[in-house]
Image (tube, helix red, strand yellow):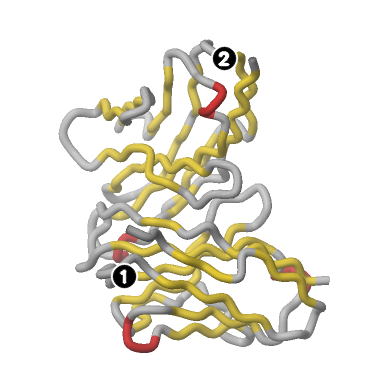
Amino acid sequence: EAGVVQSPRYKIIEKKQPVAFWCNPISGHNTLYWYLQNLGQGPELLIRYENEEAVDDSQLPKDRFSAERLKGVDSTLKIQPAELGDSAVYLCATTEGPLGSYNEQFFGPGTRLTVL
Amino acid sequence: AQSVTQLDSQVPVFEEAPVELRCNYSSSVSVYLFWYVQYPNQGLQLLLKYLSGSTLVKSINGFEAEFNKSQTSFHLRKPSVHISDTAEYFCAVSLIYNQGGKLIFGQGTELSVKP
């Protein structure tokens, strides 16, 4: 069975440009997370979806970041406009629902964003 | 608020030597505890987890971790490491109640196994 798929794997853009990341979860996984991982740090949650509903977006910088999960399957994370400080790895993770703190989260390989 | 501290950012070790990666956490409520591993160019993978019961948990590839509630620690150990264990290891917690499985990670420990 395929794991969590993310694309692109790498993205280089100039500051002030828009960028989008895509995540395809494991089939049947209702819960989807976007994490931000800065260099030398552990991942930090940006947003969590239960099906198509964003149930925790308290850490998402809403002035420039947006996310959607239409039909409760694939998800996209967008930054507009990008800033130098947004250079990081963006991770998508999914898990079987319902809400369960003990459920294993399955991570994609991430998208490494470089903003010049 | 919850936090996780991994006390060593890098741990170099020779092949077949024992290793311990240290993890301490802070939380006013009960948590589940996890170790994730990230091999080069791959996504994070669950290595082992503590939910309840026996405080010593083991992975299929020889790692083990012990939950110590009094010391709020969850150190990861392996008696004899292999070159293939070279990776970044992340300790994480999630709240038992609410929070929907949000993982709070430590900064990571880079394990480098040398021949």
Amino acid type, residue under disc 2 in the picture: Glu
The residue lying furthest to the top in this view is: B17
Q: Nearer the viewer, residue A74 or A16?
A: A74
Q: Residue at x 52, y 76 (%)?
A: A22
Answer left or right for A49 relative to B84. left
Q: Nearer the viewer, residue B63 or B67?
A: B63
The subunit letter for the residue under badge 1 reads A
Q: Residue at x 64, y 15 (%)?
A: B115
* Pointer 2 local density, CA inside 10 Å: few below 14, some 14–19, many at least 20: some
The residue lying furthest to the front in this view is: A1
Q: Quadrant of the N terminus of chain B?
A: bottom left
Secondary structure of residue under mark 2? loop
State the mark number for residue A2.
Answer: none
- Residue hosting label 1: A31
- Residue B83 versus residue A98 in the image, above or below: above
Amino acid type, residue under disc 1 in the picture: Thr
* Pointer 1 local density, CA inside 10 Å: few below 14, some 14–19, many at least 20: many
Answer left or right for A24 relative to A103. right
Q: Residue at x 56, y 61 (%)?
A: A110
Camera-near label (2 vs 1) is: 2
The subunit letter for the residue under badge 2 reads B
- Residue B68 versus residue B43 in the image, above or below: above
Answer left or right for B56 relative to B80. left
Q: Measured from the top left, where is residue B114 in percent x and y?
A: 65, 19
Q: Measured from the top left, where is residue B34 in percent x and y?
A: 36, 42
Secondary structure of residue under mark 1? strand
Q: Give a yes or no on whether discs 2 and 1 share a subunit.
A: no
Q: Measured from the top left, where is residue B94 in percent x and y?
A: 34, 53
State the mark number for residue B15.
Answer: 2
Q: Measured from the top left, where is residue B61 in percent x and y?
A: 37, 27
Q: Residue at x 40, y 40 (%)?
A: B35
